Amino acid sequence: MKPTLVKCATGLGPYKAKGREFERTLELRISPDQHANVRLRVDNIESRIIHEFSPIVLDLLELASYLYVADTSIPRGCHDPFGDAWYRTIHIVIPVREASCWKRVQKPLEELLTFLSGDAQITLDFQPYTGKPPSGQTYIDFPETDAGYKGANTVVLFSGGIDSLAGASQEISVGMVPLLVSHRSAAMRVATQSSLVRQLQAGDPTKVYALNMWVNRMGRGQADVNQRLRSFLYLSLAFAIAQQLRVENILYCENGISSFNLPLAADRIGSRSTRTTNPRVLCTFEALMNQVLQTQISLHNPFLFLSKADVMARIVAVGNGNLIGSAVTCARTIRAKRGTPNCGTCYQCIMRRFASEQRNLQHYDPVRVYAKDIFTDELTEGEERSNPVQWVRFHEKVVDLVDDQFEVEFPETVDFYDFLPGDKPESLRSIFALYRRNAQEVLAVLQEKQANYFRQFLSGELPPHCLLSLIGQRRHLEEPIQPYAVRIAGIAEVALRRAFAATPPESETALQDQLEVIFEAAGDKLHREYPTLVFSIVKTKPDFSTTCGKLFIETKLLKDSRRRAALLDAMLADKEKYSAAGAAVLFLVYQSAAYIADPTELTDKITGEHVFCKVIG
Amino acid sequence: MGHSRYDSLPKTKRWRQVIEAFSRLDSTPEELVAATSQAAGDSLWQTRKDPLVFKSCWLLLTLPLLARSDQLDQWLREVGTPPGGDYKRDLLTGTRKFLDQAATRTPLRNIFSETARLAFFETLATAFNQSNLVLFGAEPEQVRKSLSRYASPEGFQTLAETFFRAYLKRSLANVLEKEIPNHHGIAERFAGANDTRELEESLNAYCAETTALLSQYARDWYAKNAIHRQPTEGRTRAFAAYAVEKLVEDLVREQAQ
């Protein structure tokens, strides 16, 4: 893909790129420029802060805003199997007040931006401002607040999702006074963030403060919705504010699974799995900004070695469990509907849904906050199915990976190893352990869900493309067939005894007719005489089968003790035929008198893995 | 945060054939892999000049030679990672920086460049595992010895085969993964765990067979170009290009058979 030239035109003199050809030029102008197409506005900001913004801080805010808008204005394509369009080449020319300072960090900054966005290359050209640079006050559109951020001693990046809510909650619980910094690009999340802030304040506005920055493209929608450079904007504002308030700590809270973000599948490599809070990004940004701003601010992710489930549990532990349902995690808020702010099927929603199930926090995070219940709602073809299916397969893969195999399967670890905190080998081991532990919990949730919905699954009541149906025959879900067979046998035993208490069935057909009624009354939808199976040179049909074909039920009627040997032969033959079809078999043997004195003699001979037998009568 | 991006396959005739193969319940894993490699062949061919395919080959060729001649430390210093910590980790960091710099200098890239990079690190991790190097804390001498084992025609053959197998497998899996989830479920092509496992096994076998022929070439090439004369970037670039061409030719030949 040929490169795109991004001209940040406000304050830029005549510019001609030397020796380079560009496929297209994007001209951006920042508010309050008369022809502005980039809006930068900071709400609720104290006048003393904005008045004191140094030229370099204003440069940083403008650079971050331009980058964000440029990133979302240049499309990446979506039907390109090998991602030629994904890997963009972008050259940005931007006027700055402190050009020499920016040029000193230009190369590492370009490397950081290229890694964060996952583009082929992002390059910067810092130009001196022409004319008088706009002052900071121009970005204030809202009335100044009176709160004054008195006592704020930590800055927490606040998206309104679970992880940032946990960060804010935890800080408050230990007596810190956080200033929550949010980026807003659309009105959708405003209510969520504001509501959570109010609830965190619990009537005391000095307990926690909030500051919002609006940056968006004016006039038309985003050409690319992936927003890979959003965190650069977010972090820039946090650093600017922290510097002005002389706060030494910034928290960017994200669970470890999302931070490391090892690709769910082979088609999600590179920045297709976002690097927003990858330790390499946070570590590099921290070093660069401290150099640029001449500060010693610490940027830290306190949840790096926790899973989403762990993070949720922390919110509950500090007494804010009731806020979980109000947090919005979804990546597709733009498509959200009132009442169901989370789509339920994007990667974030899936992770959150599993996390609440992992820790039994469903009462705090009810299904109603999701537009779709992935476990039992029909999922449309494409991303709605690929996300949960790949999620399950990913955890099936990592659950058994030993440390050495992790490095072979996921070479992405090389990208962040150098930037891990503390003892790096120990940290990497902890990450592998975190992934394995989380995978065990995810698979346990699936197993439990499958057991809970097993009857609906077998009787075909579940939609064909809900998650439980999509993965219905996978390895970790095989075990519940036994309790289901036992249940069916128990129902048959009780009902047949009553039905034939006075007169035994005359034929196997009569026995089957009765069973059909019994199964229907019990709510179990079973096929009769279906499917037809071919075994060697013969065709056969089980008397009953579950809709999904996982369990065949074969009935036998014993009316004469001399038929016992023939009965056993027939059952052994059926066992072989049905097992060859890959299904479990349940034999229901009805005897009109005690021809088989000790049923265990028969059942012991017949039963085995996925073969069950019940002697009735 | 934590967004993952999903792309669907294009609607061109060749890719529609891949989707059709997935839609058939009776398609074999081999047919699915073959249809995918057929559709991906042209794009794979284009990667014969991919800078990261070449630089990966260059590292696989030169790192063992540097290790054997005790010049590895010097090389690490040159790429900005003076050894001092865990030596194996220093080496991984050094190679990461080297490949990142290569990518920066030649920004024309796509998913194949990314795949080549991953395949390189997979190859290195596999080589270390085969040498029974501990994950952390291996002595520098152990690491150097482990690497220098590959400074021979047979050693380079092993590394090249592992690299191109991983490269091919990851490239094809990238496409397969876009379609597999659409065919999961009861009465679908991927009804159970066995179905996806069989496809993975088939893909592994396919890539192993395809790269087996290439590995022979790698051994012969090394014997001619790295034993009695100094390997050069130019000749290695030609090796990488020819290796990719051969890989694609073998894909086409197998499909024809």
Image (cartoon, grey):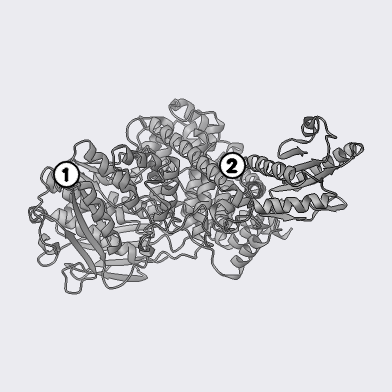
Instruction: Determine the residue located farthest toward the right in the rendered image.
Output: A562
Camera-side residue: A265 or B84? A265
Determine whether B20 is above or below A294 in the image. below
Q: Residues within 10 Å of mark 2 (few under 14, many from 20)?
A: some
Residue A190 screen position, x and y as percent: 26, 59
**Any part of residue B66 in sight:** yes
Q: Amino acid at mark 2?
A: His
Residue shown at 33% from the left, 62% from the top: A71
Q: Chain of mark 2?
A: A
What is the CA distance from the residue labelled 1 to the residue labelled 2?
Answer: 47 Å
First along the sequence among labels 1 and 2: 1
Compare residues A288 and A608 and report the one nearer the observer: A608
Residue type at mark 1? Lys
Residue A476 tag number: 2
Image position of B215 (left or right of A217): right
The location of residue B56, given as percent across then percent down, is: 49, 46
